[in-house]
Image (cartoon, helix red, strand yellow):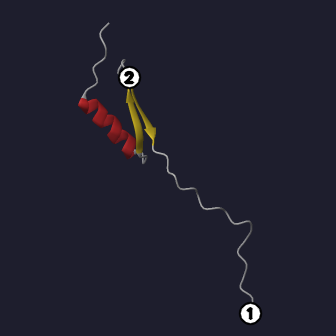
Amino acid sequence: MPAATVTKSAISRAIAAWKESGLKVGEMEITKDGTIRITAAVDGSAPAPQRAGPKQWPSR
């Protein structure tokens, strides 16, 4: 069986669908059988820590 042929339009559709879902493309892999795998980009910034309790009213 010959190797699958992946077209430029198939790759473009896969990337467009990925971005439409709100994700950023981090890495893309195309296997010999024609599978297109996209992984999300990892954001290096850490989320802001949550406060331990409710906000205190300023004292007068």
Percent position (x, y) of residue 18? 39, 41
Image position of 46 with respect to 5: above or below:
below
Residue at screen point 37% across, 45% down: 20
Amino acid under label 1? Arg
Does residue 26 appear to the left or right of 11 in the view shown? right
Does residue 46 appear to the left or right of 2 in the view shown? right
Task: List the residue tagged with mark 1.
Answer: 60
Image position of 54 with respect to 39: above or below:
below
- The count of marks equals 2
Secondary element under disc 2, as helix, strand or loop, is loop
Does residue 18 appear to the left or right of 48 in the view shown? left
Comes first in the chain, label 1 or label 2:
2
Distance in Å between CA atoms under marks 1 and 2: 67 Å
Q: Residue furthest bottom?
A: 60
State the residue in front, 9 or 49.
49
Classify 10 Å Cα crowding around label 1: few (below 14), some (14-19), many (20 and above). Answer: few
Residue at screen point 30% across, 36% down: 13
Amino acid under label 2? Thr
Residue at screen point 51% across, 52% down: 44
Quadrant occupied by the C terminus: bottom right
Q: Residue furthest top?
A: 1
Q: Which mark, by number, is residue 41?
A: none
Residue at screen point 42% across, 48% down: 22
Classify 10 Å Cα crowding around label 2: few (below 14), some (14-19), many (20 and above). Answer: few
Task: List the residue tagged with mark 2.
Answer: 31
Percent position (x, y) of residue 46? 57, 56
